[in-house]
Image (cartoon, rainbow, N blue to C red):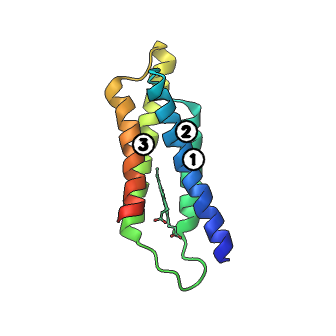
Amino acid sequence: MDLLRDVVVLLHIVGFAVTFGAWVAEAAAARFRATRAMDYGLVLSLITGLALAAPWPAGIELNYPKIGVKLVILIVLGGVLGMGSARQKRTGEPVPRPMFWSIGVLSFAAAAIAVLW
Ligand code: HEM
């Protein structure tokens, strides 16, 4: 059970890596677009995060305020990505720059909270 939980944590971190990595790739290439990879990473973070939010194996203690804050960040991030993608489709232009930067900042903030809180 412990190993299974560790595997789910690993997949949870992969979700973050995919979202943040896709964002860094866009920034480095100066494309500034919201991409499918960011969405997929976020969905993986959400599914694995919800699985980890259940107290298993028995006796484990979870920091629910921290989990709640990360869930809120993830929902806001999902909203920004959704609006950004819709706008990109409509205009053909990259997402507005403040929206693009907020994707990276929110994703990084969620990881920082996970590790530092
Ligand atoms: C973009 C959003 C998120 C990021 C970047 C993120 C990142 C991380 C990272 C790096 C860890 C491993 C470090 C640690 O164990 O403290 C972690 C653990 C965890 N995350 Fe997230 N997370 C996100 C969203 C969520 C959501 C939405 C939930 C639940 C609804 C969640 C639930 C958890 C739980 C329960 C753990 C602890 C695992 C354990 O110690 O057994 N996370 N998260």
- Give neighbour class at mark 2: few <14, some 14-19, many 20+ (Cα, 10 Å): many
Question: Horizontally, is 15 left or right of 72 in the view?
Answer: right
Can you give x and y, in whole percent of width and height, for residue 15 in the image? 57, 49
On the image, numbered disc 1 is attached to which residue? 43
Which residue type does callout 1 highlight?
A: Val
Asked whether residue 68 appears in the rendered view, the answer is: no
Query: Taking 42 as reference, is 89 above or below it?
Result: above
> What residue is pinned by disc 2?
39
Residue drawn at x 40%, y 37% is 103
On screen, residue 87 above or below 108? above
Indicate if the residue with disc 3 has its beta carbon within 8 Å of ligand 1. Answer: yes
Q: Residue at x 40, y 39 (%)?
A: 104
Mark 1, Cα crowd under 10 Å, few <14 / some 14-19 / many 20+, is: some
Q: Which mark is residue 98?
A: none
Q: Quadrant of residue 77?
A: top left
Residue 40 x %, y %: 59, 41
Q: Which residue corresponds to mark 3?
A: 77
Of residues 90 and 104, which is closer to you in this image?
Answer: 104
Using the image, determine if residue 56 lies above or below residue 70.
below
38 or 108, which lies in front?
108
Residue at image x 48%, y 41%?
20
